[in-house]
Amino acid sequence: MTARPRRRPAAVVAGVVAALALVACMPDGGGTDDGASGPGARSAPATAGEAAEGTGPADDTGAADADPADYAARLVARTQEVRDEAGVPRLEESACAQDAARARAAALVGAPLEHAPLDDVVATCAPAGGTAAENLSRAAAGPADVVDAWMGSHGHRANLLDPALTAVGVACAPDPGEGDGALVCAQVFLG
């Protein structure tokens, strides 16, 4: 398992959906002070974006009206679209990554968006390249708005378009503490 050089996203993501909190995991050179450790674990500090309105399609139903499984499926679909647009191969859907994403989303309900080490994901899912990465969101916005906001952040975009990441699993859970119908979602990549 080879670690990649560390890259960090901008401190604040501008022009994203109001109250959308974003987190991306980035290449890590080993253990870090932000929750990741070991080879293949990719982590970076949380970033928060706030601005005016989302720019997603009009039919992009927000989280308050969505079934969490349907919302997660639409996050995957939009992720595949941005990879298609960039000429990057599509991601395979992974049951193992899905299970990891489900556990991550459940753990983040009512808690700050912070990364846990991804070593267990790498050990359990055994991706060929020995790498796992994660994007997180907590939003009442629609899935297209979330992915478009991730695309506006260097770190999130790097995860979404990394051709070395070949599989994905996404899971979402209602976060009643947010009061606006927000869903917390974890997008786990394997490579």
Image (spheres, rainbow, N blue to C red):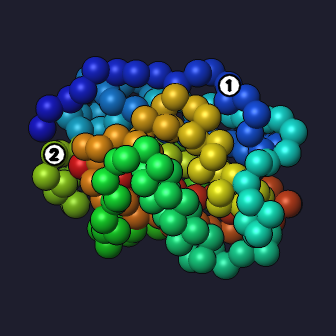
**Secondary structure type for disc 1:** strand
Identify the amino acid type marked 1: Val
Identify the residue position indicated by label 2 in the image: 129
Give x and y (percent) for residue 139: 72, 54
Residue 72 seen by the camera: no
Determine whether, in the image, residue 135 is placed left or right of residue 29: right
Residue at point 65%, 57% (across, down): 144
User: Which of these two is toward me, 141 or 59?
Assistant: 59
Q: For residue 6, what is the image quadrant? A: top left
In the image, residue 159 sits, relative to residue 64, either above or below, namely above
Choose the circle earlier in sequence order: 2 or 1: 1
Give x and y (percent) for residue 41: 30, 38
Residue at point 65%, 51% (across, down): 146
Identify the residue position indicated by label 1 in the image: 12
Mark 2 Cα shell of 10 Å, populated few (<14), some (14-19), many (≥20): some
Give x and y (percent) for residue 181: 80, 65
Give x and y (percent) for residue 38: 23, 34
Residue 79 seen by the camera: yes
Residue at point 43%, 51% (across, down): 83
Identify the amino acid type marked 2: Gly
Residue at point 28%, 20% (across, down): 5
Mark 1 Cα shell of 10 Å, populated few (<14), some (14-19), many (≥20): some
